[in-house]
Amino acid sequence: MLVNPRVKICGIRSFQDAEAAVGAGAHAIAFNFVRGSRRYINPEAAREIILELPPFVSVVGVFADEPRYSVEEIASFCRLQALQFHGEETPEYCRRWSYPVIKAFRLGDDAPEAKKGATAFTDWEPLAQAAHEYDVNAFLIDAYCPNALGGMGRTFDWSKIGGRLRRPLILAGGLNPKNVREAIVRVRPFGVDVASGVETDGKKDPAKAAAFVEAARFRPGDDDGSEALL
Ligand SMILES: O=C(O)c1ccccc1NCC(=O)[C@H](O)[C@H](O)COP(=O)(O)O
């Protein structure tokens, strides 16, 4: 049965961004601590925003190959409620956290030949095999981009997704208010994630965020009985 997918709006960099996402009804908002990335926010600025948030909005920190002690420090300082690892973090690295963990994998025709420990793939089967080694709380499946780990507003061929993983699937990569409904009906993910598709001039756009959340809502008649990739 298709249930309301959870919506995460990623790349919050200001109070205004947070207001746009929370006001739109996002279930979760994410702060990007990936050094050198274009949506990077320093922990001090993130903490100021997070301390002002209302309840009932999950706060996620996005990291990529960050040393463990640094993630622990930032997570505690910023009162994060979940961690998203977007680099080549190993199954071992993703264990024994005091927070729910989302592990990102990427799919794309131009992904490099997968070596051991890869988290970017051209095809579903090897991605699913790699993901099976991870004991995490959810998997985020994003579009592969050659020059960035994420956040590039690029979609991938959703028909590549060949079935369930051992944990809920969060779909990401180039989603926006116009395509998220099709993505949900075709993939039936547990959640959807967006950064670029709800922005105007690099800032979260309240109207686009609201339109995205609305488009992601379950509607009578959507349910064709197929199982969500929970
Ligand atoms: O958003 C970024 O700039 C980013 C940079 C480096 C690693 C991860 C990043 N974002 C993580 C996300 O979960 C994004 O929401 C996801 O990649 C989708 O982004 P978009 O295609 O722009 O919606």
Image (cartoon, rainbow, N blue to C red):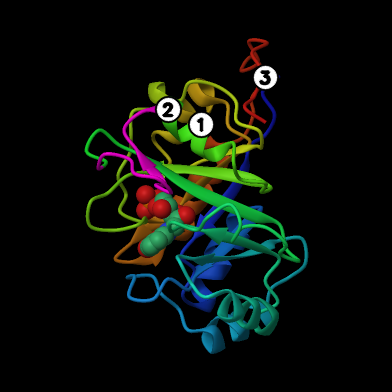
Residue 175 visible within the image = no
* Disc on the earlier residue, 3 or 2: 2
Instruction: Tell me which amino acid carries mark 3.
Output: Pro
Instruction: Tell me which amino acid carries mark 2.
Output: Trp
Q: Quadrant of the C terminus?
A: top right
Q: Residue furthest bottom?
A: 44
Give x and y (percent) for residue 113: 26, 39
Q: Nearer the viewer, residue 29 or 165?
A: 165
Q: CA distance from mark 1 to mark 3?
A: 32 Å
Secondary structure beneath dot 3 equals loop
Q: Which residue is mark 3?
A: 220
**Residue 113 included in the magenta stretch of the image:** yes
Q: CA distance from mark 1 to mark 2?
A: 6 Å
Q: Which residues are magenta?
A: 112-124
Give x and y (percent) for residue 33: 47, 73
Q: Horizontally, is 22 left or right of 116 in the view? A: right
Residue at 67 percent across and 58 percent down: it is: 95
Residue at 39 percent across and 47 percent down: it is: 118
Q: Which residue is mark 1?
A: 128
